[in-house]
Amino acid sequence: MLRVALCQLTSSADPAVNLGTVRTQVAEAAAEGARVVVFPEAMMAQFGTPLTPLAEPLDGPWASGVAAIAVEHDVLVVAGMFTPAAQQGPGGTRVRNTILATGFGQHLGYDKIHLYDAFGFRESDTVEGGSEPATAEVDGVLLGITACYDVRFPELFQELADRGTAAVVVPASWGAGPGKREQWELLVRARALDSGSWVLGCGQADPAETAADVHPKAPTGIGFSTVAEPFGEVHAQLGPAPGRLLADIDPELATTSRAATAVLPNRRLGRTRG
């Protein structure tokens, strides 16, 4: 079993404050036996904050601070941040929406591939998309790294399964609106079922639960962090308020699910065949 902690909260506009929150949450989760501690997308700074002045590389002070926390508590920490991008956007310099994974000798960033140009929001105006899937290993278990809107794209999750992942983390800052909670829950479960993976969706909490000061038009979270097991059932879930969800996941269940459904070997479209 691998114990994972999902830390559902509302990040602020101040990276230093948010780093302090990471420090506190990781210490508490590690004391509860977690080996992986996951934070939401935009943990470094909430959406609606000017991102370009805050973006920094993976060897910058914020990511290095998270790395030191991971080493201190002997865990893998996964958290959303923003790194500089090379290309220009309509409003000037873009950033990359990066999910940091650090600990156990690993320090890497996954740059969000699928950008949230949907529901009237255009992430691509300020964010440069990535192109490469990413994985990290903990106690012999390979984890896939994704972000928020990626959960709408089954091919990415199946590609990660082909690479040997047993679980996929999905840090998110889900946009609110009619039906959005239902879509989030359905998508987390669907990606688990069609890839035969544990899917660990960790979202920003609903700011209304704490009267947090957020940009009213930015996707700043709805809560409902969800762990779905590889047959698509909900294993554990939070509500809209801040909280920490602990889940013990069995990597062997991914193997069992893939053998039973045979979805991965039976694919006929969207893969190369000899």
Image: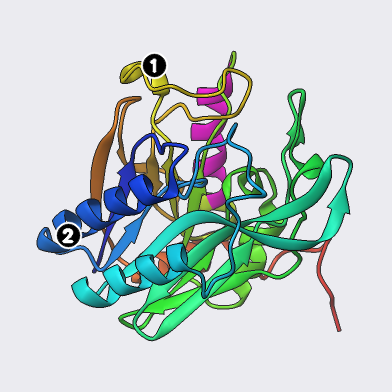
Does 260 sit above or below residue 234? below
Measure how far apart labels 2 and 1 are at the Cα level: 26 Å
Q: Which residue is drawn at 31% across and 20% down?
A: 210
Tell me residue 168's x, y (percent): 49, 60
Q: Mark 2 points at which residue?
A: 27
Q: Which residue is drawn at 63% across and 45% down?
A: 51
Tell me residue 243's x, y (percent): 25, 36
Quadrant showing the C terminus: bottom right
Q: Mark 1 points at which residue?
A: 208
Per the rendered image, the range of residues in magenta is: 179-191
**Mostly what secondary structure, the magenta segment?**
helix
Residue found at the very far left of the displayed protein: 31
Between residue 93 and residue 219, name the one nearer to us: 93
Classify residue 181 as left or right of residue 139. Answer: right
Residue found at the very far front of the displayed protein: 53
Magenta region includes residue 184: yes
Q: Image quadrant of residue 269? A: bottom right
Magenta region includes residue 139: no
| Residue kind at label 1, given as amino acid type | Ala
Between residue 93 and residue 43, name the one nearer to us: 93
Does 40 sit above or below residue 260? above
Q: Helix, strand or loop at disc 2? A: helix
Between residue 173 and residue 228, name the one nearer to us: 173
- Confirm whether residue 166 shows in the render: no
| Residue kind at label 2, given as amino acid type | Ala
Q: How crowded is mark 2: few (under 14 residues within 10 Å), some or many (20 or more)?
A: some
Residue found at the very far top of the displayed protein: 178
